[in-house]
Image (tube, grey):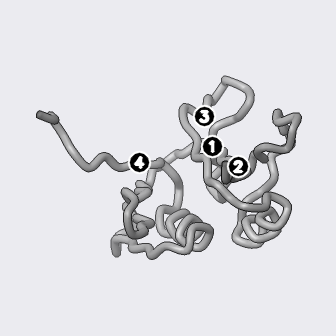
């Protein structure tokens, strides 16, 4: 028997509503935010929500450096990375200067709060 159920991913950030809006737009999900600005969620059918909580004094991770380690990141799958890139940039993402993929299988970006995430090439086989 499981001890717990329904895990969720919670990201610290300076503006939960803005980050929920970003991820909801990228994933074509819905989003909600508390009136006091302390909590927001992006959610889609069949997936656990991505949750965002305000962290006063938030400092973005510095990747690949370890002074402020990333601790986690999100991978999202796309059919065409070059086609998806301008779309996430228009939502507020930035392309990270460090791109470790040598075969083009993924590209590293930062969300509007500085969390790394990757657009990964979907494999249909």
Q: Residue 123's x, y, as percent? A: 69, 49
Within 10 Å of disc 3 (Cα), the crowding (few <14, some 14-19, many 20+) is: some
Q: Earlier in the sequence, mark 3 or mark 2?
A: 3
Q: Earlier in the sequence, mark 3 or mark 1?
A: 1
Tag 4 residue = 9
Side of 5 where 30 appears, left or right: right
Q: Earlier in the sequence, mark 4 or mark 3?
A: 4
Q: Earlier in the sequence, mark 1 or mark 4?
A: 4
Tag 1 residue = 60
Please report the residue visible at 66 percent of the width from the left and 24 percent of the height from the top. Answer: 67
Secondary structure beneath label 1: loop
Tag 3 residue = 70
Within 10 Å of disc 2 (Cα), the crowding (few <14, some 14-19, many 20+) is: some
Please report the residue visible at 73 percent of the width from the left and 65 percent of the height from the top. Answer: 88
Q: CA distance from mark 1 to mark 4?
A: 17 Å
Q: Residue 87's x, y, as percent? A: 76, 71
Q: CA distance from mark 4 to mark 3?
A: 14 Å
């Amino acid at each position: 028997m499981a001890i717990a159920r329904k895990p969720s991913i919670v990201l610290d950030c300076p503006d939960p509503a803005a980050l929920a809006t970003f991820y909801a737009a990228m994933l074509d999900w819905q989003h909600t935010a508390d009136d006091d600005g302390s909590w927001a969620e992006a959610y889609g059918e069949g997936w656990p929500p991505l949750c965002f909580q305000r962290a006063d004094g938030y400092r973005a991770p510095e990747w690949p450096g370890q002074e402020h380690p990333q601790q986690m990141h999100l991978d999202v799958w796309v059919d065409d990375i070059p086609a998806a890139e301008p779309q996430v940039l228009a939502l507020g993402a930035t392309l990270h200067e460090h791109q470790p993929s040598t075969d083009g299988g993924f590209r590293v970006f930062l969300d509007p709060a500085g969390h790394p995430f990757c657009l990964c090439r979907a494999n249909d086989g």
